[in-house]
């Protein structure tokens, strides 16, 4: 008889608490310190409130769920489920994956922590994939192994509207940020594997979109086996400006006809480092 598997992720996946209930996935809210006050994403901190505080120049610091919060959730789930697959945000972007892996040692293999280096819409897809694999009869350890082997079968490209927040977080020098502002550059970043890296510099929004669409198509065709709807999940993510994201989604649909495109706000843990106005396109190879 197949084991009953619970799938756990965190709010970096973009899955809201309401969506989690409908999907049958459990979502740990990520904590934030804003001017030394504690908030939890999607519980005591909404997207709207977050960007309002960011615009006010508030001091925003990301954190990770406490060991107590993680273990309380696991303990409650293990009263109902045989095993847990826990999918935190990328280990290259937060320490929450390593922390969860240490905690899982106390559970005798019943909790499997997946280090597959996903974030935002690609992390969401991993949680859905875990559910699909459990439905096929895989146990938690087999699901973890599958998802970790599959980790490089995704890409994200993000175009920033401003360099201010990267400068504020110390991720680029003030001189580089000033030069980018003067030249009105739109940097395009990428997430492939565990790091957020520079990919290209665009002089206009239109050029930035073109760079991202060309890059994501190249990944589909050269790395993931073909740019076909039955092979690829295609996703859009954004920070704050939903109208711009919907317009971009229409442009993506023209480039990739026949694809179902999922769109979500970017994780606030990424948004606090890159600021509002960012647009992202992502893809994941469908599991076979």
Image (cartoon, rainbow, N blue to C red):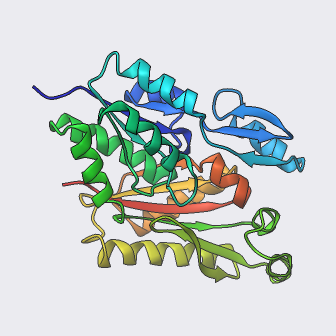
Q: Is residue 236 above or below residue 101?
A: below
Q: In which image quadrant can residue 182 be found?
A: bottom right
Residue at the top extreme of this rendering: 79
Number of callouts in the render? 0
Left or right, 54 with respect to 249, comes to right
Image quadrant where residue 183 sits: bottom right
In the image, residue 192 above or below residue 135? below
Return the x and y of residue 281 as percentages of the image width and height: 50, 62
Give 31 or 288, whichever is nearer the viewer.
31
Q: Which residue is at 38% across, 78% downward?
A: 218
Quadrant of the frame with the C terminus:
bottom left
User: Looking at this rendering, what residue extends furthest in the right direction?
Assistant: 56
Quarter of the image where the N terminus is located:
top left
Q: Residue at x 25, y 45 (%)?
A: 143
| x, y percent for residue 172 | 75, 74
Q: Is residue 21 left or right of residue 158?
A: left
Q: Position of residue 125 (x, y in %)?
A: 38, 48
């Amino acid at each position: 008889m197949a084991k009953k598997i619970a799938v756990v992720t965190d709010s970096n996946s973009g899955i809201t608490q309401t969506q989690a209930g409908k999907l049958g996935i459990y979502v740990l809210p990520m904590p934030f310190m804003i001017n030394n006050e504690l908030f939890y994403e999607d519980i005591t901190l909404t997207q709207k409130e977050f960007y309002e505080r960011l615009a006010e120049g508030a001091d925003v610091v990301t954190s990770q769920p406490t060991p107590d919060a993680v273990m309380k959730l696991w303990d409650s789930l293990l009263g109902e489920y045989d095993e847990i697959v826990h999918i935190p945000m990328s280990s290259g972007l937060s320490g929450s994956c390593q922390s969860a892996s240490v905690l899982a040692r106390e559970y005798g293999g019943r909790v499997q922590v997946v280090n597959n280096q996903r974030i935002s819409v690609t992390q969401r897809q991993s949680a859905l994939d875990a559910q699909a694999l459990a439905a096929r009869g895989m146990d938690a350890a087999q699901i973890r192994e599958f998802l970790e082997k599959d980790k490089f079968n995704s890409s994200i490209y993000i175009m920033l509207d401003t360099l201010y927040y990267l400068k504020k977080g110390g991720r680029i020098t003030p001189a580089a940020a000033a030069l980018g502002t003067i030249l009105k550059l739109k940097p395009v970043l990428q997430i492939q594997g565990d790091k957020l890296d520079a990919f290209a510099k665009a002089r206009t929004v239109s050029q930035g979109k073109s760079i991202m669409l060309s890059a994501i198509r190249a990944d589909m065709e050269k790395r993931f086996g073909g740019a076909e709807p039955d092979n690829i999940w295609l996703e859009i993510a954004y920070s704050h400006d939903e109208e711009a994201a919907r317009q971009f989604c229409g442009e993506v649909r023209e480039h990739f006809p026949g694809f179902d495109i999922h769109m979500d706000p970017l994780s606030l843990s990424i948004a606090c480092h890159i600021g509002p106005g960012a647009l992202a396109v992502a893809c994941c190879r469908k599991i076979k």
